[in-house]
Amino acid sequence: MTPLDIKIRDQIKADGPLRVSEFMEIALSDPSHGYYLTRDPLGEAGDFITSPEISQVFGEIIGLWCAVAWQDADTPRKINLVELGPGRGTLIADILRTARNVMPEFAEAIDVHLVETGAVLREQQRSSLNDYDVEWHDRFDSVPEGPLLIVANEFFDALPIEQYIQTEEGWQERRLFIDKENENLFFGPYPPASKNLIAIPDVIRDSSVGSIFERSVAAEQVVGEITDRMVTEGGAALIIDYGHVRHGVGDTLQAIRSHKYHDPLLGVGEIDLTAHVDFAALQSAAQASKGAVFGPIFQGEFLTALGIEQRTNALTKNAPTEQADVLTSGSRRLIAADGMGTLFKIMSITPSAENSSAGFENIKEGIVV
Ligand code: SAH
């Protein structure tokens, strides 16, 4: 048993069945043993790989988006560039390099703020950005005032979710229990139904018995906070993640270890836990804070609209064959439907519909499903 396996069992014995969000919070963010606090999970040798780690072109395109967003915000003399969950710092380093190359006045205006809880990853970020002044934050709310650009790639999928399940008696929360015989953990409905019940969206309410609905209060709160800030201070946000465009049912809590699916209840603290992002919920949260929402659109569409193919061709032209092949296959993986091109979606938030967002111009309705 891992130290967190023991902690979770002790907590259930003391306080009763654990909410799925509490379970994720402990597994990922426990101060002593949480998954993200104790390791660098990225890369071939780790548990999973992300778009910026696949190709530099990803961060270069996001860098272009940032440069245009700075112009749309009337080129403020200072702007906070905030990344939520920056991993190894690869994306932010690619964005900053691009800014220096394409728009030095923008690069001059940037103050870098990274929201990261993990000490090991902070060290990695420090070495990726040794050329820059960087301020780290445990939470977004300590980022100083001023106009801001916010980028989050695969951050929201790591935030805790709550789960609800349809039963013969109606919707109930789904929680984590211990089997008294063998101490195994298992998920089950947690009556009483009425007490913890949130508003289940209309399109979900009549789902069949056994259906699971997920909600991430934590994710909605972050979106509310960043939108409030943009509405008062100006700026734009770009959220990139895998997930669904409409509210849906299904259990998307998943664990990954060494690039393979894993039982989320085995090896707590040593495996990655994520859930699909409900973009419809994030959209409502942004709109409740009076922000304008663009998309979500497919990652492939966004990267293509901002010139991933042209950029890849320019880079491959003068590169040795082997490097050119890596660049070409990397870009293909980022945009292809059988790669990350449609599983991943991109949504942008700005303070008002008058501030457009680069890459979304031709897509008025977002994804139609
Ligand atoms: N954006 C990076 C890494 C994605 S992994 C990339 O694309 O490669 C998720 C990142 O979010 C990690 O840096 C992790 O430490 C961070 N993270 C997860 N939960 C967090 C939380 N509650 N607060 C701040 N950072 C968090």
Image (cartoon, rainbow, N blue to C red):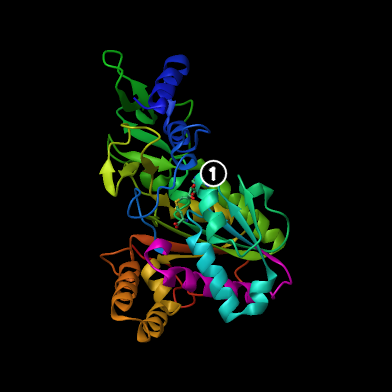
At horizontal 26% and vertical 13% (from top left) the residue drawn is 181
Instruction: Between residue 249 and residue 64, name the one nearer to us.
Output: 64
Q: Quadrant of residue 244?
A: bottom left
Q: Which residue is mark 1?
A: 119
Q: Quadrant of residue 231?
A: bottom right
Q: Residues within 10 Å of mark 1 (few under 14, many from 20)?
A: some
Residue 192, visible in the rendered structure: no
Classify mark 1: helix, strand or loop.
helix
The location of residue 292, given as percent across then percent down, is: 58, 64
- Label the magenta part by its dominant secondary structure: helix
The location of residue 234, given as percent across then percent down, is: 68, 65
Some atom of ligand 1 lies within 8 Å of the CB belonging to the residue at label 1: no
Q: Residue furthest top?
A: 181
Quadrant of the drawing holding the N terminus: top left
The amino acid beneath tag 1 is Ala
Q: Is residue 14 above or below residue 169?
A: above
Quadrant of the drawing holding the C terminus: bottom left
Q: Quadrant of residue 290?
A: bottom right
The location of residue 221, given as percent across then percent down, is: 57, 45
Is residue 242 highlighted in magenta?
Answer: no
Segment tinted magenta in the rendering: 52-80
At horizontal 49% and vertical 77% (from top left) the residue drawn is 361
Instruction: Between residue 139 and residue 104, name the one nearer to us.
Output: 104
